[in-house]
Each structure stands twice: as C-alpha cells, then as structure tokens.
C-alpha cells in the first residue's frame, strides 16, 4: 500500500491469521469465519498526518470471502454496494470492506482517489 499512496511510509505490517479470525467470530457469535482461510496481510502506512490501513484476507472460495465481508461490514455498519460494503466516504478518505474474487479487503482511511487501485493490488498480492 505504501507504494500506491505516493509519499507514504509503512509503519506496520503483519498477518493476523485464522485463529484471530475465528476468535473475532466467536466473540460476536458468528459461525467460523476462518473456514477456507488461505492467508492474510495487514499493512498500516502514514502519509503526512494521516494513517491508513488495508487488511487483505484470502479464502479458498469466493463464497467464504463474501461471508467474511458481510460479517465484517455488519460489525462496522456498512451497506452493500455491488462488490463493496461501503462504510464511510468523507473528508476524501474511504473506509470499506470490498471483495475481489476470493479475497476480502478491509480499508481504513484510504484516500478516495487511490482506494480502487489499492484494492486491486491487495487482491493480486494474495493470489
């Protein structure tokens, strides 16, 4: 993400893993959301005073990615739009949950003009 948001520096990168996804589901009374989990990556960057994050989670099947996206969007109050559950679009930033095939991407405060390119890149990175 840092390369796509010109002038941004990576300040954190990790994988959360299936165990944390299953814990999230258990805490919120959902069925196992980790079924089909194939990998994930979370990256946080800083560009000026703004921090942005992207969490991409790959699943074996698109239906598993869709189930995770629907759960996460409901958790944060998103509304379905085509292949996205938009959560917030204001001040030139997007926070959203989107689908790219079998990959769910969660964004927090990604610049509006770069969120689609960032989503596509996240989807390609975990294939």
Image (tube, helix red, strand yellow):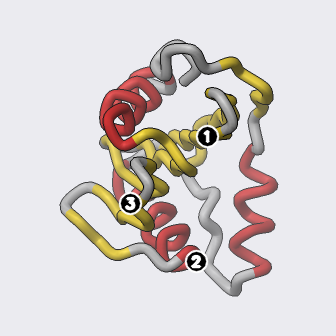
| Residue with the mark numbered 1 | 52
Closer to the camera in the image, 4 or 7: 7
Position above or below: 54 against 68 = above
Disc 3 crowd rating (10 Å Cα; few below 14, some 14-19, many 20+) is some
Nearer to us: label 3 or label 2: 3
Residue identified by numbered label 2: 75
Is disc 1 placed on a helix, strand or loop?
Answer: strand
| Whole-number angstrom distance, CA of label 1 to CA of label 3 | 14 Å
Residue in front for this viewpoint, 40 or 110: 110
Query: In the rendering, at what x and y percent does residue 114 appear?
Result: 37, 32
Residue 77 in the image: state x and y as whole percent. Answer: 49, 79
Q: Earlier in the sequence, mark 1 or mark 2?
A: 1
Residue contact between numbered discs 3 and 2, judged by CB atoms under 8 Å: no
Nearer-N-terminus badge (1/3): 1
Q: Do we see residue 17 in this rendering?
A: yes
> Which residue does the numbered mark 3 point to in the structure image?
89
> Quadrant of the image for the C terminus?
top left
The disc at residue 110 is: none
Q: Residue at x 41, y 60 (%)?
A: 90
Q: Is residue 28 above or below residue 123?
A: below
Which residue: 61% across, 77% down?
31
> Quick one: SS at disc 2?
helix
Tell us which disc is closer to us: 1 or 2.
Answer: 1
Residue at the spot 31% in from the left edge and 42% down from the top edge: 101
Query: Residue 48 location in percent, x, y?
Result: 65, 28
Q: Where does the image place residue 33, in percent across and percent down from the top left?
A: 60, 64
Q: Residues within 10 Å of mark 2 (few under 14, many from 20)?
A: few
Q: Dot 1: within a 10 Å radius of its alpha carbon, few (fewer than 14), some, or many (20 or more) residues? A: many
Residue at disc 3, secondary structure: strand
Q: CA distance from mark 3 to mark 2?
A: 17 Å
**Mark earlier in primary sequence (3, 2):** 2
């Amino acid at each position: 993400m840092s390369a796509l948001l010109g002038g941004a520096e990576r300040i954190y990168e990790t994988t959360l893993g299936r165990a944390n996804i299953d814990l999230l589901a258990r805490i919120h009374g959902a069925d196992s959301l980790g079924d089909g989990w194939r990998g994930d990556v979370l990256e946080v960057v800083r560009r000026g005073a703004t921090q942005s994050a992207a969490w991409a989670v790959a699943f074996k099947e698109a239906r598993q990615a869709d189930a995770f996206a629907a759960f996460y969007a409901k958790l944060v109050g998103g509304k379905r739009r085509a292949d996205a559950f938009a959560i917030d679009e204001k001040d030139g930033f997007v926070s959203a949950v989107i689908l790219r095939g079998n990959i769910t991407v969660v964004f927090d405060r990604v610049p509006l003009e770069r969120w689609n390119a960032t989503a596509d890149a996240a989807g390609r990175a975990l294939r």
